[in-house]
Amino acid sequence: MKKSFLLFLYFLFLFSFSNAQNIIWDGKNNSINIGKNIEILEDKNGSFTIEDVKSKKFRALFVHSKQTILHFGFTESIYWLRFSLENNSNKDLSLEIAHAFLPTTNLYYYDKENNLIEMKGGYEVLMNEKLIKHHFQIFPLPKGEHEFYIRVLSNAHPLPIKIWEKETYKIKTSQQKLVYGFYIGFMFFVILTNIFFFFTLRNWLYLFYAFVVLIYVCYASMVMDGFVLYVFDDLDLMFWYLTIPTIGVTVQTIYCMLFLETKKYIPKLNKIFWGIIIYFAVYVFVKELMPITVVLAINTVHAMASFFIMGFVGVKVGQKGNQMGYYFAIAYFIYFLLVIVEAWEKEETEKSKNEMQEKLIETTKENARILKDQNVLLEKKVIERTEVLNETNEELNQINEELKTTVEEVEQQKSKINLANSKLQIIFKQVSKQKEKIEISHKHIKDSINYAKKIQDAILPSLDLFENNLSDYFIFFKPRDVVSGDFYMLGISFLNEIVARKGLYQAGKILDILREEIKKSLKQNSLYLFRNNEMIEYKGNKQPIGIYRKEKSFTNYEIQLEKEDKIYIFSDGFIDQFGGERNKKFMKKNFKKLLSEIQNENMNKQKQIINNTFENWKENYKQIDDVLVMGVKI
């Protein structure tokens, strides 16, 4: 406990934070995945408006995304997404949210005249009402620098979000539609062939197979190329998106019964199949009463279960003597593996592509930053030299004007002019030397401040010292200037001398000796101890450490700590800070109230709340002193 108490006297600094970086489009890429450049806010009740989420209160609630492809799981919450884009090229850009079955997908931004621009998407908006007619959610993006907000309800769908160069995206979608067109044409050929065999051979197996393929084509077309959306632009897409899989599994079950002759080989399981068919028929109507997230989860279970059931039935029929059962089971097993492999390869390819894009973007940003810094430095030097030259030119122009008006006196004034020119050159040299001296002095001052900062950092204890001695703590340290005040630097040096070399561990004696070492006043603040949600205050002695006529020894408190105790020490910088609506001090009573409200939170969150409270109180007012608050949980 002695070491812990001494660590309270050694206090440390700093905390860091990071914000999402702006997306800079420089025209070097055709597309960018912006999943990790987005900030997210969950709206559980769907009650937030664009004015709400844009306000200062809500901005702090956004969380930076860590996903390349956003996925919110089975939820009915509305999510607000925020990102900033700077388009420095002459290319038109489009935002793509690559999913057709999103009920709500609206994009918001403010134009140069601060007018709110809203673009609506989602399956609730008919195809002929969309700004860009596409089965995915596509929005045109303006040039320049803007902040965008997206209001989206995902219903468990993944949200791949990309920014595309407009013409490149048109070419890509045209190529995809061409491939899908050949694919769907081939599928319709298969359907017509089986219908022909049905009418020719009068075998219902061909008709059900054609029906299975037709259902698959309809579902795939809605998801992949969206031709159904163009032909039937007033369809209830979500109804069919949730219903077609159930109809497909039902027809697939009937086809399995006919193809494997389950009534002949496994009559008991055949009855179970009819029960499954009846269940699916009832489910088609009952699902309309269920939440969408529940229906999606049930449909997923149906799809996964159908693979295993069909494979199991194939094996059972094979064991009963119908060899086609084995082939049927093997075919389903291979199909299942192909689906998994395709999904895995697609995910790995997308992941690799996104990693390469992120590395390229980071490199581009760094190069742009270096170039910008160099340009700023060059511009500054050019401006300085131009000002000097302009001043000299003005003086020379004035002399030339005088010479023009006094041509007759040229010879007489020649010597005077030469003398004046000599003086001007001397003055110019003096000005140049003064300028160089000022620049050198400025550099020395800046280097001294930075070096003092490094010395201060070296003197202060490292975070490892706290990590090795305290299990749960926080240190909120905010110096007023680059280098903090002289007192605590001197104090740390003297404390090292007193504790390390003289071997003293009594806080009262340490402070008595410290008072003799430095003659500078310091306000003594209390130590707050929270135990069982009650605050205990240990007040410091009301006497300075420096010169004082009525000097007396400091009081040495020994506190028997208990588990779950919370201890707080602090400087007067927080309490004395001016701010708020009336530009008044924060005051000690408000600080005690703040600690009482947050003392049950974890230490990291307490630090964040203290920082936010200080910044919100200070706002645009100047920080008057160094601020330190330290908390430890036993």
Image (cartoon, rainbow, N blue to C red):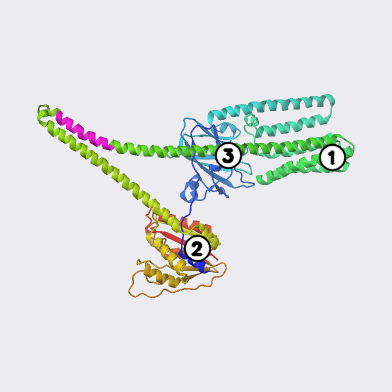
Residue 535 location (% of width, % of height): 50, 69
Q: Amino acid under label 1?
A: Val
Kindly identify which residue carries mark 3: 355
Residue 584 location (% of width, % of height): 37, 60
Q: Verify whether residue 401 appears in magenta.
A: yes
Q: Amino acid under label 2?
A: Gly
Is 365 or 323 nearer to us in this picture? 365
Q: Quadrant of residue 544?
A: bottom left
Question: What label does residue 410 carry, if any?
Answer: none
Find the distance from the CA under tag 2 to the CA under tag 3: 40 Å
Question: What's the residue at 43%, 72% (across, down)?
Answer: 509
Kindly identify which residue carries mark 2: 631
Q: Which residues are magenta?
A: 387-403
Question: What's the residue at 51%, 72% (across, down)?
Answer: 559
Instruction: Note whether 540 is above or below 201 in the view shown.
Output: below
Q: Is residue 288 left or right of residue 605?
A: right
Local crowd size for mark 1, using a 10 Å CA cut-off: few (<14), some (14–19), many (≥20): many
Q: What kind of secondary structure does the magenta stretch mostly adopt?
A: helix
Q: Is residue 277 left or right of residue 613?
A: right
Local crowd size for mark 3, using a 10 Å CA cut-off: few (<14), some (14–19), many (≥20): some
Find the distance from the CA under tag 1 to the CA under tag 3: 44 Å
- Please state which of the two labelled residues, at mark 1 or mark 3, is closer to the viewer: 3
Q: Amino acid under label 3?
A: Glu
Local crowd size for mark 2, using a 10 Å CA cut-off: few (<14), some (14–19), many (≥20): many
Disc 1 is placed on an element classified as helix
Which is nearer the N-term, disc 1 or disc 2? 1
Kindly identify which residue carries mark 1: 315
- Please state which of the two labelled residues, at mark 1 or mark 2, is closer to the viewer: 2
Is 93 or 23 nearer to us in this picture? 23
